[in-house]
Image (cartoon, grey):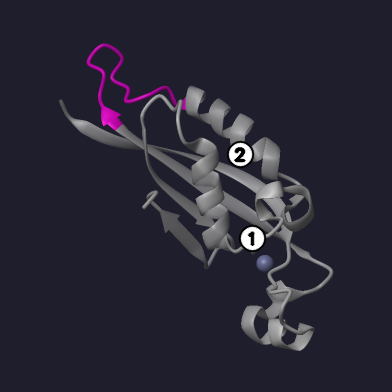
Amino acid sequence: MPIVTITRRVHFSAAHRLHDPALSDEENLRVFGPCSNPNYHGHNYELDVSVTGEVDPATGYVADLGTIKRLVEERVISCLDHKNLNLDVPAFADLNPTAENIVIVIWQMLQGGLPAKLEKLVLWETPQNYVEYRGE
Ligand SMILES: [Zn+2]
């Protein structure tokens, strides 16, 4: 059976601040740059959710992308969209909401119950910067 990876792109907007509470504001600015602004700032995130599986000979699908869209909206977008990641999302209470940590948290939110194997997440924080995670 041919194995194909399919991807659904979703979008969310969220505020965050990157900082280490053990460092001074000046040191945080040196390490995290403008993302350490104490009054927070926003990003428009794009998330690509890829799942892999056999192509069903009856439907020609690996999985129904509508089902994946619904699950991603329920489990991820409803928790992160238009939120302050530091203040509103318990996963980031003691975890710096870098793109790397956000993509790992999203992976945990999506584990189990998808109609095909979760293969890869790609999270764009800006049009220039993205991170990839395969669950390792
Ligand atoms: Zn930022």
Q: Within the magenta stretch, is there residue 63?
A: yes
The correct choice, above or below, for 75 with respect to 25 in the image is above
- Where is residue 81, by image quadrant? top right
What is the spatial separation of the Cα atoms under label 1 and label 2, in whole angstroms? 17 Å
Tell me the quadrant of the picture where the N terminus can be found: top left
Q: How far across and down, in percent of the image, does residue 85 sit? A: 72, 54
Name the residue located 64 percent from the left edge and 78 percent from the top edge: 32
Q: Within the magenta stretch, is there residue 72?
A: no
Between circles 1 and 2, the one closer to the viewer is 1
Q: Amino acid at mark 2?
A: Val
- Residue 6 placement, left or right of 95: left
Residue 60: numbered disc? none
The correct choice, above or below, for 67 with respect to 120 in the image is above
Name the residue located 70 percent from the left edge and 73 percent from the top edge: 19
Q: How far across and down, in percent of the image, does residue 64 sit? A: 42, 22
Return the residue at label 1. Answer: 95
Q: How far across and down, in percent of the image, does residue 102 sit? A: 58, 55
Work out whether mark 1 precedes mark 2 in sequence or the reverse, and give the earlier one. 2
Give the image quadrant in which the ligand numbered 1 is located. bottom right
Label 1 Cα crowd, 10 Å radius (few <14 / some 14-19 / many 20+): some
The correct choice, above or below, for 93 with respect to 38 in the image is above
Q: How far across and down, in percent of the image, does residue 128 sit? A: 52, 68
Q: Amino acid at mark 1?
A: Leu
Label 2 Cα crowd, 10 Å radius (few <14 / some 14-19 / many 20+): some
- Residue 16 placement, left or right of 129: right
Q: Which residues are drawn in magenta?
A: 53-65
Q: Secondary structure at mark 2?
A: helix
Residue at the top extreme, as displayed:
58
Q: Nearer the viewer, residue 120 or 88?
A: 88
Name the residue located 56 percent from the left edge and 41 percent from the top edge: 10
- Magenta highlight: main SS: loop
Residue 76: numbered disc? 2
